[in-house]
């Protein structure tokens, strides 16, 4: 099986649902970043069942502040961008992450460098949300789209690893509604975002940056050793 990054998206040919014009453009521009991410050491290890519980716990701890900040910033978006049909409440992950962090609290603390990296990602998201919301939404799409796609494969392996260690399954990749339904609504909502031509250009231009930021996190996670 080819390794799949944490925020991966399916290619157009893998989609069971048709993609709109904007989504087709998005998938084309993230293709190269997607391929780069496939070779990340942590992603391979997780999909092959070789990641450690400590690495998984570090991932979850890093994602909690990132998603908490991102979802607070979503609440502050202008109404036209918040009301395109994206199912924000069902996609929200910070509560599930908070539960997961508590469930994995017995595992050793994550390196401080991961906290610093998470803070850098949050600063980037905050700046984009305030200055160029369409660019911020590119990062939102990369994250939620990945959680609904390749993240579902990662969940199976992560939960298997944790189960073997006597630890509870993660809630992060478990959504309250059918995945296909949420993915379709996310896609439809992205298509309906009221963007001017230059704003859509910014959205497309920024999407690969979402992968690159996540790759920094994946690289750091690969350096964590099992206790």
Image (tube, rainbow, N blue to C red):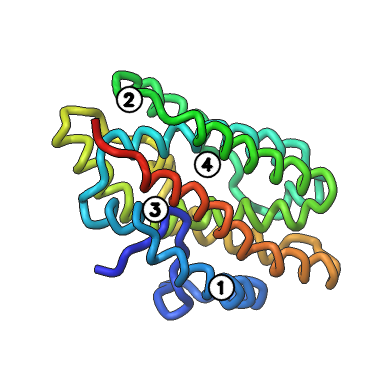
Residue drawn where x is 14% and y is 36% of the image: 164
- Count residues near mark 2 (Cα–Cα under 10 Å), then give few for <14, some for 14-19, many for 20+: many
Residue drawn where x is 16% and y is 28% of the image: 166
Identify which residue, 102 or 85, lies in the foreground.
Answer: 102
Question: Which image quarter: residue 19?
Answer: bottom right
Residue 151 is labelled as 3
Q: Which residue is mark 4?
A: 90
66 vs 187: above or below: above
Q: CA distance from mark 3 to mark 4?
A: 16 Å
Q: Position of residue 122 (x, y in %)?
A: 65, 39
Q: Quadrant of the C terminus?
A: top left
Q: Considering only order in the chain, which callout, 1 or 4, is on the residue closer to the N terminus?
A: 1
Instruction: Tell me the SS state at disc 1.
Output: helix
Q: Considering only order in the chain, which callout, 4 or 3, is on the residue closer to the N terminus?
A: 4
Q: Considering only order in the chain, which callout, 1 or 2, is on the residue closer to the N terminus?
A: 1
Q: Which residue is mark 1?
A: 27
Q: CA distance from mark 2 to mark 4?
A: 23 Å
Instruction: Tell me the SS state at disc 4.
Output: helix
Q: Which residue is mark 2?
A: 104
Q: Considering only order in the chain, which callout, 3 or 2, is on the residue closer to the N terminus?
A: 2
Foreground: disc 2 or disc 1: 2
Foreground: disc 3 or disc 4: 3
């Amino acid at each position: 099986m080819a390794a799949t990054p944490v925020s991966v998206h399916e290619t157009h040919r893998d989609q069971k649902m048709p993609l709109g014009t904007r989504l087709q453009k998005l998938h084309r521009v993230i293709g190269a970043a997607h391929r780069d991410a496939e070779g990340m050491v942590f992603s391979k290890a997780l999909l092959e069942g070789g990641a450690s519980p400590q690495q998984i716990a570090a991932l979850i701890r890093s994602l909690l502040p990132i998603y908490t900040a991102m979802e607070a910033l979503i609440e502050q978006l202008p109404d036209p961008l918040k009301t395109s049909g994206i199912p924000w409440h069902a996609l929200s992950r910070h509560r599930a992450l908070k539960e997961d962090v508590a469930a994995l609290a017995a595992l050793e603390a994550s390196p401080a460098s991961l906290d610093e990296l998470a803070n850098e990602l949050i600063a980037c998201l905050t700046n984009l949300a305030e200055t160029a919301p369409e660019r911020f939404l590119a990062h939102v799409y990369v994250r939620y789209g990945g959680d609904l796609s390749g993240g579902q494969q990662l969940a199976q392996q992560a939960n298997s690893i944790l189960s073997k260690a006597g630890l509870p399954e993660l809630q992060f990749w478990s959504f309250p509604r059918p995945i296909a339904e949420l993915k379709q609504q996310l896609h439809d909502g992205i298509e309906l975002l009221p963007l001017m031509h230059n704003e859509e250009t910014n959205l497309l231009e920024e999407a690969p940056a979402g992968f690159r930021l996540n790759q920094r996190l994946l690289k750091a996670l690969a350096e964590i050793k099992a206790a």
